[in-house]
Image (cartoon, coloured by chain):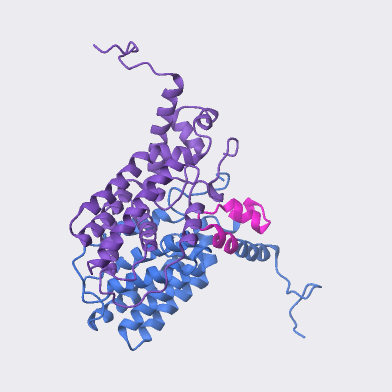
Chain colours: A purple, B blue
Amino acid sequence: MSSTAHHPDGQPLRSDAERNRGRIIAAARTVFGRDGLGASMASVAREAGVGIATLFRHFPVKEDLVAAVFADRMDAYVTAVDEALDDTDPWGGFTGFIEAICAMQAADRGFADVLTMTFPAAEAFEARRAEAYQGFLELITRAKRSGHLRDDFASQDLILLLIANAGVVNFAGEFAPDTWRRFVALLIQSFQAPARGPLPDPPEDDALYQAMRRAGPAGPSTQERPGGD
Amino acid sequence: MSSTAHHPDGQPLRSDAERNRGRIIAAARTVFGRDGLGASMASVAREAGVGIATLFRHFPVKEDLVAAVFADRMDAYVTAVDEALDDTDPWGGFTGFIEAICAMQAADRGFADVLTMTFPAAEAFEARRAEAYQGFLELITRAKRSGHLRDDFASQDLILLLIANAGVVNFAGEFAPDTWRRFVALLIQSFQAPARGPLPDPPEDDALYQAMRRAGPAGPSTQERPGGD
């Protein structure tokens, strides 16, 4: 028998605050998964069965809630990069990583959006993303050096792919859930060396960052505050 | 001097109803162009300076309004197919058509969405779309026969491209307005024969149609009725 204090129902004792926090995160996972990250804080509070004031006490800005909900997915994202870097075949590692993260997008509509947004207020979350991105840059370098990835592939092309695939996943939904596989296969073939022709320049990193900020919950269109919902 | 009756300000006399209709369409063009087709009927009424009841008297369902706003774009879409069919180079016609419609998406966010939706209630509008689609099937046949388009290209791949490009256009917006050019160039290269590898099967036409219906204003998530806004 453990010495931890238990409720009569066998659960360890937890404060109301802890219980509410867990309930909110679980509810947000459901709501974001179903409706995307555009879902309102009010609908998360309703799903959790807590008041909106309680929700905002735990998560003053939506970014905090998003980061709490998707922390494990972001960890899986970093793991996918690490595994790809362990692949002794640079092209196999590169394409395997792309397929893995696109599969993650297909499995979770909310996470599909998270990958195309940025949450500056959620610093630890963004640090993990930056870590994955550094690994991806290394995957690019290795795949180019192996001669299998076109020389003019740019890191920005990953963002384009994630944006595009989020659109395909959200559109096809349960009607044609495997559509993304064909779409991503086409794009991977387009990345393959030798290039079949020149490409227009990629967008500037800074421009994409601004677009990711706007797309996220800190952006103007989905900004929410207590009472504003 | 014309014999048409004029207002003192020189405009031809028009009934209030006609004036309101024109004002609503112009307002909807502005609102859809700015906020996408998810914009509410109420926001169109506000922009037009008419009551919501007046708006619904002219356009009982949102599909009618969308069709009225985008009739000229849909005509341009059909024209783009016709011009591509006139091209003596089948591959040039095929790729030129894709670039033309993706440019139309980039120039008008609302139309970018229209191309990935369907509006069953707007029959004349949908007939034009069907006409363009028939032309596109002919473009595919010719481009394959010329040996430049991969044999396993499916008409459904056009829908995937339009969905994906709508996502890229909406995401990059004014921050990186030319991003779509690189993205579309990559996809066109992936369509080129010979294929670099096999592809997973395309989604069924019927599944894509259902997804287009859901995405449109007749779909469940954006359905609006007077009083529901």
Residue at the bottom extreme of this rendering: B88
Find out whether residue B48 is within the magenta segment: yes
Q: Is residue B136 above or below residue B198?
A: below
Q: Which secondary structure type mostly characterizes the magenta part of the structure? A: helix
Q: Nearer the viewer, residue B69 or B185?
A: B185
Find out whether residue A135 is within the magenta segment: no
Q: Is residue B226 left or right of residue A80?
A: right
Q: Residue at x 37, y 42 (%)?
A: A33
Q: Is residue B213 above or below residue A198?
A: above
| Residue A159 place in picture, x, y as percent | 39, 59
In the picture, the quarter occupied by the C terminus of chain A is top right
Q: Residue at x 41, y 48 (%)?
A: A114
In the picture, the quarter occupied by the N terminus of chain A is top left
Q: Residue at x 58, y 61 (%)?
A: B28
Q: Could you tell me if residue B200 is visible in this image? A: no
- Residue range in magenta is B28-56
| Residue A116 place in picture, x, y as percent | 41, 53
